[in-house]
Image: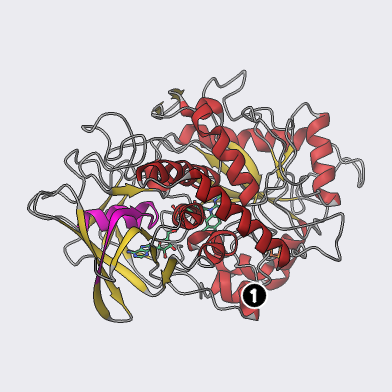
């Protein structure tokens, strides 16, 4: 066997790729991880809102096209750890019902080929691995879980606690958002996380966010059987003459083209780039793109309908870590609207510098400062439905083309109204009854739907299912059309649900990892022994 042949090649190191690499590492199998990016440089600028949010210093400079051929600068990041380096680490399980068919105002959200119960043990493993902090039993839509969260929930700061109390008094069931940050509130002097105001959207300078580089990739490459090559852009996957096996993975590494092969190839480039990679790998046996006999590759792109809604209330909001409160009372509908609406939570606390990036030029700085001091910065998520016309294709010049028409928008409008109504009903006990009223006028909201370039929650482009005519992957996430090709990033989702996607991608990667260990004949006794040694080593470090 050549030196360039491995048991497993994993392409991409985000939520899917990083997690499966971690899971397979103790198997002793020869594993090659290929990542197009480098490590996020550790520098003070990691936490600088001007550099991160205004200059978009860490985002890719790549440009894509929208359906009208207009340039699109995607808000996405190519680094070891993928987008988890920058995520807000809100780590939710999908609801049990999300795995079945659900009727929405805008149409049908289809069933998954696996059930919640199939994924439940892997959700538990993923929550332990990513050190999720949460309180079970608070969220009224929470699916059943066999164990508590590994860490207690991150506490609300006073302004958020007050809002939570107000919501509860008005009959809602606010809950603590489950988050993957390494905060130890009982032992602050030992806590790796310092609870700062630059978490959501920023890389963690002190390595205290549970991202897939810190938690998974760094651990995986401690094993001598695992090799990570950074700055290694996978350009295409070539098959053998039968078309049933990926025979070589063609990589451009530091400007040089190299080729690698493996018994099993796991693609995990993110839903948009994975679809692009398969489409670019078309050959005689796969004329419409690799694994694309169904013509489904790239279709059903989903990314959630998301809005940031700032409630600029009279009451100031000096919160540092704001992403602690969620409301799911409207997730499946309400008395006056029988369809699912979605999920309400928070983004990281917005500041004047970040606001300036999206503000009209006439807004004076002092207004932005005042707005930032008083705003509650809500994050609203509604499910978008899989539409085959919403898709990733490759333009004539090789660029990614993202064609997307939003759908199910009524649900999102209703969710916004519900939040406004909930804010009206609340009465602040700390500052008086006018607390949640607008600072500049009654109930002033500043809101913005996230544009197409905001591809943070991308999913759905390489869906899994039982039927090779309507799905690309089988329920184990193996391509129907090939024997050794798997996909484990967010592209396997048949529906997008309305909570953040990363924990489901991680849990599924662990599930597929178990399947691959069986396929590769890994002895569970040897695997367990290596795991034990790993744990002992970790304690001694
Ligand atoms: C600002 C921000 C905040 C977010 N907050 C949350 C949150 O709070 N909760 C949540 O659940 N989700 C959140 N998300 C979304 C979450 O980060 C993603 O759902 C998740 O990272 C997707 O995992 P993935 O494995 O599908 O892809 P990614 O994490 O994007 O990983 C893909 C990897 O593949 C690499 N790659 C791409 N193409 C190639 C190629 N051709 N060759 C080699 N390597 C390649 C990329 O560099 C990257 O490392 C957020 C995202 C962003 C951007
Ligand atoms: S809040 Fe904690 S995990 Fe997040 S960036 Fe700050 S120190 Fe890192």
Asked if residue 269 lies in the magenta stretch, the reply is yes
Q: Which of 261/487 is in front?
A: 261
Question: From what the image shows, is residue 287 above or below residue 50?
Answer: above
Circle 1 sits in a helix, a strand or a loop, which is it? loop
Q: Which residues are magenta?
A: 259-280
Residue 351 placement, left or right of 336: right
Whether residue 92 can be seen here = no
Instruction: Indicate the quadrant containing the C terminus: top left, top right, bottom left or bottom right.
Output: bottom right
- List x then y, in percent, for residue 431: 91, 47
Q: Is residue 196 left or right of residue 74?
A: right
Which residue corresponds to the image point at 59% horizontal and 64% vertical from the top-left? 214
Question: Looking at the image, is 455 positioned above or below residue 443?
Answer: below
Q: Residue at x 51, y 65 (%)?
A: 223
Other-residue count near label 1 (Cα within 10 Å), few / some / many at <14 / 14–19 / ≥20? some
Q: Ligand 2 is located in which of the four quadrants? A: bottom right
Residue in the image at 61% along x and 39% along y: 124
Residue 257: where, in percent of width, then height?
23, 76
Query: Is residue 204 left or right of 224 when viewed as pictured?
Result: right
For mark 1, what is the residue?
A: 48
Instruction: Judge from the rendering whether residue 116 lies leftward or rightward of residue 354; answer left or right.
Output: left
Foreground of the two, 53 or 245: 245
- The question of residue 97 being in magenta is answered with no
| Colouring convention used in this rendered image of the protein | secondary structure
- 522 or 159: nearer the viewer: 522
From the viewer's perspective, is residue 456 above or below residue 341? Answer: below
């Amino acid at each position: 066997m050549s030196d360039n042949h491995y048991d497993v090649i994993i392409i991409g190191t985000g939520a899917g790729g990083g997690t499966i690499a971690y899971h397979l590492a103790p198997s002793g199998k020869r594993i090659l991880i290929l990542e197009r990016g480098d490590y996020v440089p550790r520098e003070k600028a990691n936490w600088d809102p001007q550099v991160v949010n205004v200059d978009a210093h860490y985002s890719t400079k790549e440009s894509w096209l929208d359906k009208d051929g207009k340039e699109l600068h995607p808000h996405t990041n190519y680094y070891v750890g993928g987008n988890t380096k920058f995520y807000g680490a809100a780590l939710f399980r999908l609801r049990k019902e999300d795995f079945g068919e659900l009727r929405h105002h805008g149409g049908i959200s289809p069933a998954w080929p696996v059930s919640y119960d199939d994924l439940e043990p892997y959700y538990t493993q993923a929550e332990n691995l990513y050190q999720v902090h949460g309180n079970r039993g608070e969220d009224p839509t929470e699916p059943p879980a066999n164990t508590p969260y590994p860490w207690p929930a991150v506490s609300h700061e006073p302004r958020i606690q007050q809002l939570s109390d107000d919501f509860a008094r008005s009959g809602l069931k606010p809950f603590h958002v489950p988050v993957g940050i390494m905060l130890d509130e009982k032992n602050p002097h030992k806590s790796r996380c310092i609870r700062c105001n630059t978490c959501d959207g920023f890389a963690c300078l002190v390595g205290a966010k549970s991202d897939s580089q810190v938690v998974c990739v760094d651990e995986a490459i401690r094993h001598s059987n695992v090799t990570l090559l950074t700055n290694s852009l996978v350009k295409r996957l070539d098959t053998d003459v039968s078309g049933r096996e990926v025979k070589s993975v063609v990589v451009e590494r530091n400007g040089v083209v190299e080729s690698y092969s493996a018994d099993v190839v796991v693609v995990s480039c993110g839903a948009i780039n994975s679809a692009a990679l398969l489409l670019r790998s078309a050959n005689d046996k796969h004329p419409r793109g690799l694994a694309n006999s169904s013509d489904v590759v790239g279709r059903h792109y989903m990314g959630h309908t998301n809005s940031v809604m700032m409630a600029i209330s009279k009451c100031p909001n000096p919160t540092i870590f704001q992403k602690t409160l969620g409301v799911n009372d409207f997730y499946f509908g309400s008395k006056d609207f029988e369809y699912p609406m979605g999920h309400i939570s928070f983004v990281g606390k917005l500041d004047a510098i970040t606001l300036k990036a999206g503000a009209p030029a006439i807004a004076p700085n002092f207004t932005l400062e005042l707005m930032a001091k008083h705003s509650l910065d809500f994050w609203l998520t509604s499910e978008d439905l899989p539409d085959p016309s919403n898709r990733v294709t490759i333009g004539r010049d090789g660029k990614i083309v993202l064609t997307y028409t939003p759908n199910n928008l009524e649900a999102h409008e209703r969710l916004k109204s519900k939040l406004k109504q909930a804010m009206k009903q609340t009465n602040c006990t700390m500052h008086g009854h006018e607390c949640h009223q607008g600072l500049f006028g009654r109930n002033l909201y500043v809101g913005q739907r996230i544009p197409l370039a905001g591809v943070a929650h991308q999913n759905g482009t390489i869906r899994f299912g039982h039927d090779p005519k309507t799905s690309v992957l089988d329920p184990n996430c193996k391509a129907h059309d090939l024997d050794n090709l798997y996909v484990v990033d967010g592209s396997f989702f048949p529906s997008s649900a309305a909570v953040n996607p990363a924990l489901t991608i991680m849990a599924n990667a662990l599930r597929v990892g178990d399947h691959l260990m069986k396929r590769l004949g890994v002895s569970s006794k040897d695997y367990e022994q290596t795991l034990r040694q790993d744990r002992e080593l970790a304690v001694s470090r």
